Amino acid sequence: MPLSMPSPSLAPSPVLTPPPSLTHRAVDSDRRRTSASAILRSVLAHGPVARSTIARLTGLSPASVTDHCNRLTALGLIQEAATLRRSNGVGRPHVPVDLDGSRFVVGGVHVAVPYTTVALLDLRGRVVAERRLNHGEREKEGDVLANAAAGLRALLADAPGRVPLSVGLATGGWVDRDSGTIVEHPLLGWRDVRAREVIQALTGLPVHVDGHARALVNGERLFGRTAGAGGSVLHLFVGNVVDAAFATHDEVHHGPRSQSGAIAHLPLAGGTERCDCGRTGCLQAELSERTLCRRAREAGIIRTADPMHILAAAADGDPVAVRLLLHRARMVGRAAGLLLDVLNPDTVVVTEMGAVHREDCLAALREEVGPDRAAAVVPTSFPDSVLAVAGGSVALDVLYRDPLSAPSSVPPSRSSGSSPGPI
């Protein structure tokens, strides 16, 4: 064979490209999803709001805004407000639109070490109903999740006319959002728990699963004090579990298999607690509520493992209880300062019992961070419902990112609002 003739076996492989029609459909679908998300979030932030204002806020054309508002109205997510707004010029008054807060809810499940919180949240992230379900630390995961589904069912039975869209589940430890799996929760002894599959089978609803620190970043971004502010946000969660989450440009960083935010074994300067890993001064060993309660029991302040009793003792003027809470707040401030050095976020949101409920603890935390950065540190926006909001925010974040997916969540026979839904 002449050398100038290419061998058939060496011919380049054809490059497979999708047909132009498929590419265009995908681009159009992404554009519709992005536009619908921007409109629904504008209604969340500013409603009741005129369509002309939405067009100005989002940069979309008035025709596009009208089309998407019609779609969102048909889904039951928004409705025309009863109050008309006069235009600046002549012509008919504007008819503003607002979220329909009376119809749809999402279910929220937060699995903590001593108990599970189940809740219903409306489209504005407000807690409609909430219940705490106690469980043992080593209770089987199947029983805990089954009880959570039963708890949601009970809440819906007491809320006639509310239609569930989906369920969000949040917990500490390593949670893989994509697979809906609790990969590892050492304090509960859980490994590779396919929580999404279990709750979905028990409720018949779409289920979304994420770590509670990431869930709370989304809650702050949608409904909290950082909503609409832009910039970067770090959330530091200090309970029995200590973990963190970081968001920038409206996206929460997850990392491979959603393993980001695992800070339990970062060394904390001045820490004295021996960790299960064999080292001394790990963040979780030093800051966890278990450690706080043990110290309070040793000091004779409480007899239980409920950290809220320490808060109550401090409120009654017990100086030892106050000292324990202030020491913990300072150490949390030291941890916040460490994360500030690494990530340099615009805002640090802290969920820690003392800083949330006591001004002296928040002041001590900020003092440890330092005067130059103290103003960037704020307590959670949800002091009385943080765990309920964590669970619900997992589902609400998905809804606000892709509101046009809502119809698949509501069977037509249930959409009238006369039934509590598939759960």
Image: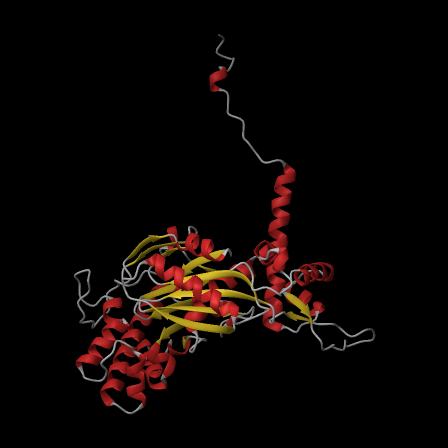
Q: Position of residue 216 (x, y in %)?
A: 43, 67
The single residue placed furthest to the right in the displayed view is 90
Is the residue 378 above or below the residue 251 in the image? below
- With 93 as the anchor, is 338 left or right in this view? left
Q: For this rendering, which residue is in front, 1 or 395? A: 395
Furthest residue in direction top, as rendered: 1
Residue 71 in the image: x percent, y percent?
68, 59
**Quarter of the figure with residue 353:** bottom left
Please name the residue shown 49% across and 69% down the image.
Answer: 155
Can residue 217 be seen in this snapshot?
no
Residue under the point 59% across and 60% down? 37
- Colouring style: secondary structure
Viewer-side residue, 326 vs 83: 83
Tally of marks: 0
Residue 307 seen by the camera: yes
- Where in the figure is residue 165, as x and y percent of width and height? 55, 61
Task: Find residue 134 and report its image quarter.
Answer: bottom left
Query: What x and y, as percent, mark residue 206?
Result: 51, 55
Q: Nearer the viewer, residue 6 or 188?
A: 188
- Judge left or right: residue 398 versus residue 64: left
